[in-house]
Image (tube, coloured by chain):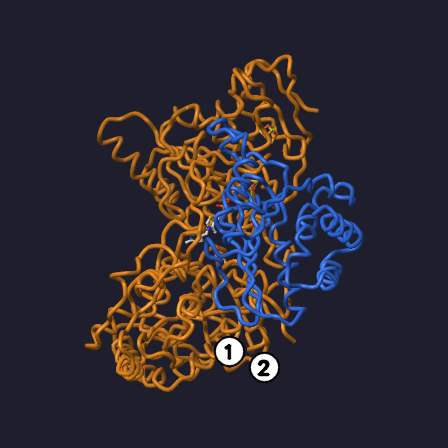
Chain colours: A orange, B blue
Amino acid sequence: MKTIISGNEAIALSFEDSGGVFASGYPGTPSTETLEEVARLGKVYCEWAPNEKVGLESAIGASLAGGRSLATMKHVGVNVAADALMTLTYTGVNAGLILMAADDPGMHSSQNEQDSRNYAKFAKIPMLDPADSQEAYDFVRTGFEISEQFDTPVMLRTTTRISHAKGIVEPTGKIQPKVGEWVKNVPKYVMLPNFGKIKHVEVEARLLKLQEFAETSPLNRLEMGDTDLGIVTSGISYQHVKEAFPTASILKLGLVHPLPEKKIREFAGKVKRLMVVEEMDAIFEEQIRAMGIGVHIGKDKISFCGEVNADIIRAAAGAPITTGTAAPVENLPQRPPTFCPGCAHRGLYSILSKLKVFVSGDIGCYTLGALPPLSAMHTCICMGASISAAHGMAKVNEIAGRTEKPVAVIGDSTFFHSGITGLLSMAYNGGNALVIIMDNRTTGMTGGQENPGSGQVLQGEPAQQVNMVDLVKVLGIHNVVEINSYNLEETEAAIRKGLETPGPYVLVDKNPCILRYRVKKPLYKVAQDKCTGCRACLKASCVALGLTASGEKPKVGIDPNICNGCGVCAQLCKFDAMSEV
Amino acid sequence: MKVFNIVIAGVGGQGVLMASKVLAESALASGMDVKQNEVHGMAQRGGSVISFVRIGDQVHSPVVMPGSADILISFEPLEALRYVHYLKPGAMLVYNKGTINPSTVASGLATYPSDVEEQISGICGDAHGIEALSLAQEAGNAKAVNMVMVGSVLKNLPIDAQVVEGVVKALSKDKGVEVNLKALRGGAAAA
Ligand SMILES: Cc1ncc(C[n+]2csc(CCOP(=O)(O)OP(=O)(O)O)c2C)c(N)n1
Ligand code: SF4
Ligand code: SF4
């Protein structure tokens, strides 16, 4: 039966239909819904790993034990899992293994734009690049076949518009999962130098075989049309090409590594102008040029940055673009995301903002504390970096004779992902930073996924729950204090104490994410006779707050449909104008 | 059928995605090809959301380009103004007149323009504002604003209203069926 589903849902469904046995991964937009859907469908075992490296390594184990396995992650997650990947390419697999990497060109919700096709080249493994939900479905099945036939991990790469866009999918029938043998094979799976040397030779030979496969595989499809313009493309770019030039000749690549050299040469020979359309890096173009084939239109006309669309492609080829478009209205108030009304992060940031400390930040909802009016985060590099970077800062401050202590802010999921090792280093190396762990017992930013601190697994069933304070202590941190960041006065005192006390100092806030746990608190209201219109409360950056009228000194009101009673605005008010309803 | 481009705009939490789902499922149920895609970045936290539904005989890209929407449905006036340039010349806009402050306005960093509706009519000659919140409340739930908005454009879509009603019924739970259908019809009557 035909259904309309997203690329992520299609991958999950196909994983189940293609005999999948084990799936693991770590949340990250735009990959997250894949594992959630495997769990919702409910037939195949799946789990959240604390980070992508653990997820991939668990999938490797599952493959070695004979089960078809899947590891899901966003593009930057592949960096975390790369250590495993770069040697997994040597060992190969037992049962099929797919690594799904979801790229985010245009950075809809990521810290960088990173083209995962580089990893397929780097690891010398095959990569599939679906162009819609149906292909996402089909390519999982094909991916397992390639993985087993060539004894290699396979990367399945999506982009945001493939992962999240919905299209019609017709499933192709179910394969019953079967678990193969669990074999000991030292030369294949123990990568000591002597075995590794042999394996490297095999990896190079495998790549040549895959190249031959690419030449004849229907994954790479010639669509001959008008021969004035011939376009080599893949993935979502293919769809944009079809919009821009419906009658052009196209070489649509489904297997984007290794490339079919003969097929490309043959195609180039048939068309007058060869164009390469790819988002982000010039992966195809560089390789095609290295084959000695001329590319007439490519990255000289299409940016390395952001997404591609039909008009960008038309313009690059010198064709007219969409006309009659009104210009976007300028200078409208932006509508950036901010903490949910009632979120515990708000209280913490109003204090950090007031104290004007240097905040070494991390990735999560709490990163929004970097935006005005709070403006209280000064670095955000990658998951886990808050603590290790704060440690480095503190060491240099010490060398420079500066007395200011840096503050690291990190969420629970991020702490489990890669903050623990940073804190271990700080304890071990005698660091001097204040670390604040916002333990809201969920992975909030990506939509509220379970983690080792939430007491639930992916399916929602009860699980072992790590005790944050105990965990911090066992790393060698002696000063660990629980705080309640809804209470500004107490929290400020705790932060000041942490800043004054020499050595590593950790504060843990355990208020749950109000969105994930649907916490409803009593509403607040503003006494209009007491409000002076000073706007001190607006610093809370809460969308429930608003000015009640225009004019000289309008007063503040609280929208009862939006307020979730955290009381932070009331504590910022110097005139006692706000109270519970 | 040539591809018909629908753009739905709003604020995180308003049910833009559910409205998109209703239209996409309705297109599928009518035997058409369809692609639906939204950019929601971090929209759950009060950000702006824009969603595309493209229907026709064969749809390639899930993205609607500025200047090519056949209809824009906006759940909030400022968001209507933000995305009005997505419309084709002469195409139609229906927006909910109820405003929601962006965080920049709530924190005093910006002011909500007082002439949003005038600006909209200045750019789009076929713009219609409706009181979606009160219609949703009349139907029994303030959250049904999204169904009111879908209802308000029903007669302008290349999909049969009966099919849409069927999809809404199938996607709603228990008491929601009655509320959503009432909201859908209320929107249709108001337009
Ligand atoms: C390596 C990597 N994996 C995944 C992500 C996606 N991601 C961004 S924030 C986040 C987790 C945030 O959870 P938490 O630290 O608990 O903070 P909260 O959002 O709940 O405040 C994730 C998984 C990422 N940016 N980088
Ligand atoms: S999702 Fe949770 S952690 Fe994120 S802003 Fe909302 S309440 Fe805060
Ligand atoms: S209006 Fe005040 S009490 Fe209500 S959620 Fe916002 S900051 Fe908290």
Tell me the number on the disc at residue A141.
1
Residue A469 can be seen in this image: no
The answer to whether A115 is drawn above or below residue A546 in the figure is below
Tell me the number on the disc at residue B189.
none
Q: Is mark 2 within 8 Å of ligand 1?
A: no
Q: Are marks 2 and 1 in contact (CB under 8 Å)?
A: yes
Residue A166 can be seen in this image: yes
The answer to whether B20 is drawn above or below residue A471 in the figure is below
Name the image quarter holding residue A440: top right
Q: Provide residue B45's location: percent of width, then percent of height.
A: 54, 42
Using the image as rendered, state which of residue B4 and residue A340 is in the foreground: B4
Query: In this image, B131 relative to A139: left or right?
Result: right
Dot 1 falls on a residue whose secondary structure is helix
What residue is at 35 percent from the left and 39 percent from the top?
A: A379
Using the image as rendered, state which of residue A160 and residue A111 is in the foreground: A160
Query: In this image, A513 relative to A105: left or right?
Result: right
Tell me the number on the disc at residue A175.
2
Chain letter of mark 1 equals: A
Q: Provide residue B100's location: percent of width, then percent of height.
A: 59, 36
Using the image as rendered, state which of residue A175 and residue A419 is in the foreground: A175
